[in-house]
Amino acid sequence: MQYLTNILFLIALVAAIGFFTINVRKLIRNIKLGRKVDISDNKAARWKNVLLIALGQSKMVVRPIPGLLHIFVYVGFVIINIEMIEIIFDGLFGTHRVLSTVLPMGVYNFLIASFEILAMLVIIAVVLFWTRRNIQKLKRFWAREMKVWPRKDANYILYIEFVLMVLFLMMNAADQRLQVVSPENYSTAGSFPISQFIVPLLADLDVSALVIIERTSWWLHILGVLFFLNYLYYSKHLHIILAFPNVYYGKIKPKGQFENLEAVTKEVKLMMDPNADPFAVAPDATEETPEKFGASDVMDLTRHQLLSAYTCTECGRCTSECPANNTGKLLSPRKIMMDTRDRLEEVSRNIDKNGKFVPDDKQLLDDYITREELWACTTCNACVEACPVSIDPMSIIMAMRQYLVMEQSAAPAELNVAMSNIENNAAPWPYNQMDRMNWAKED
Amino acid sequence: MEETIKVPTMAEYAAQGKQPEVLFFVGCAGSFDDRAKKITKAFVKLLNKANIDFAVLGTEEGCNGDPAKRAGNEFLFQMQAMMNIETMNAYGIKKIVTACPHCFNTLGNEYPELGGKYEVLHHTQFLKSLLKEGRLKVEGGKFKGKKITFHDPCYLGRANNEYEAPRELLEKLEVELIEMRRNKRHGMCCGAGGAQVFKEPEPGTMDVNVKRTEHAMETNSEIIATGCPFCMMMMTDGVKAKNVESSMEVMDIAEMIAQADEL
């Protein structure tokens, strides 16, 4: 009987990690639906970006207030998770505050004290974040694409973090009292700069009540953490893991340098080669179906773009800097990322159900992202610059434009005019190429 | 005012068996748009004043392909690019200067993968280097002390991280530079990029260029300085739309330097 709690703990832990693993594998499977990209280049620059942008939060602090608050939550999250080592060990082996028996007391006290201070900072940040979303109602949290679920999701995350921190402090407060009233079972360990202020509230409680509070807090805290871990896959909160790979795979080249389409290069070279045999059969004609130009669905996007869709935390900094969105157009770079993820999840459920993807008469284009949105982009890179985790929504817009123009010939009429001008007279306006130097003769 | 400006072509240079120091890639706007042609001429005056050995492609130049690529027409872009590259490689071009950030970006960033490898400079970068080498002098003249704001062209700024060259030139013009609320990395597009300038905007509450003009108006500047012929078109339209033509002018930095020197 005495091992019952240890066994229950083990079951909870294995179930949580098992379920999480299943979802991680699904995540990887879904990302692999995208096209392969070569990211073997520029390793040094990529690691530097991970260090500065992901670990160092350099883009978050561009907006100082949310940036600083986010650093509280981020550092709090990372550091307080050291405590998980102790919790998991205690849970499995029935020990109590095992680290206090292995670490020098000074170190242990320092650790616990810093966890408590960070927990408090997290609570403050979370409350302010909640206020910004729900009381202050910052515009970017209430944009059109922020429908019911994205808004709820954001608040759920804040509630969970708040409750986890409160439970952690409650556990410590009860433990402190127990160290006083029941020293034979609770050895003195830890320094409690924050939870000491909760202790007076527990002054009248007897040992059994204190034990219940301490154990309940301990259990709810760890179960909460395990739940949160599994909530990630269904939430925008995946960024706490995916931000790192996404930043690593982020664009290294100048923002103005758009991808070169190799398949097109081959064809254009052939067209321009005076020695090419126009009737020649392509040597690898039997090999595969001709490549599709651009993207109409998630499978046509790159793996990095799909990873980005899962990484997006819907903060809306991209959209708040987008000139099209700023002037009331439908386009919102954040919506591009959210739509990509929603469609990818739909495809994922399709695969779960059918074993493989069965065409469902739907696609990213039109069913999720409209042409009106795509054509409103000025390719100004403001969204790319704004993203704190190196997401490039513009690259998806470009890929979809390529599909519209090269596969569907569906550019807006005025652009077709400009393009045929370029084709006929090497300028987007109908001027003769022979008049290209007339300016030098005019006064 | 009848004055001829000296504009040699690459063909002429090649005929004499000579190679210019730099190719001036004029671009479509600089060649055909009435307002942008003034920028082209102002820049040529500066090149002549500094005794720069330059040439243009003239009728052998074609659109760099930027609007085609950004509209999604990779075929057309690569056709244009390869034709230009063929021409420029045949002339043995090494160094290019252009007064258009779109030409600057495409030639510098997107031509290399298609076989066109050149050192490409935006005209503000080139003018800055002339200044450093003492080949050109920039003084405030009529702009001294004037309130001026600078609109960062996206394809110079965010796309290629060049925020300082134009500002250094403005500093030399001794103007009072007042930044807009969104500048440099966070600069707001004029609305022309991504081939937008060739089509009507999608429905919205206002046009991008009007919004950007409002930002400029907040600075109470007399001049919106910029370094892009398309920003020039958009901001000029914006100034007209806001009915502030009498108090606000849009100028390219090259024009300002030329005028300061009374060229």
Image (spheres, rainbow, N blue to C red):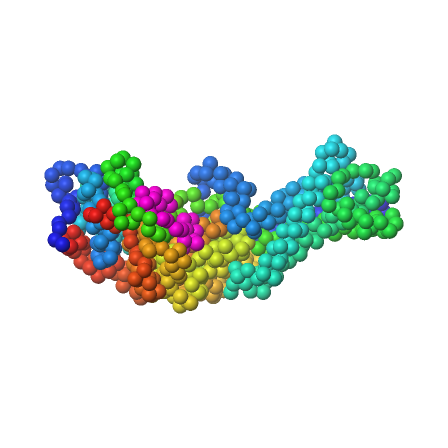
Magenta stretch: give its range: B163-188
Specify whether residue A136 is painted magenta. no
Outermost residue, top direction?
Answer: A104
- Find residue A21 and report its horizontal and vertical position in percent: 62, 48
Above/below status of A211 relative to B206? above
Examine the rendering and report whether any part of residue B102 can be seen. Answer: no
Counting the numbered discs, the total is 0
Q: Nearer the viewer, residue A358 or B40?
A: B40
Residue at point 28%, 38% (across, down) = B131
Relative side of A41 to B122, left or right: right
Residue at point 32%, 54% (across, down) = B223
Residue at point 85%, 47% (across, down) = A1
Residue at point 25%, 40% (across, down) = B137
- Find residue A423 and report its horizontal and vertical position in percent: 24, 57
Q: Nearer the viewer, residue A376 or B55?
A: B55
Relative side of A101 to A248, left or right: right
Q: Nearer the viewer, residue A329 or A32?
A: A329
Relative side of B81 to A365, left or right: left
Q: Could you tell me which quadrant the C terminus of chain A lies in?
A: bottom left
Specify whether residue B183 is painted magenta. yes
- Find residue B14 and report its horizontal and vertical position in percent: 14, 40
Examine the rendering and report whether any part of residue B221 can be seen. Answer: yes
- Find residue A30 and report its horizontal and vertical position in percent: 53, 53
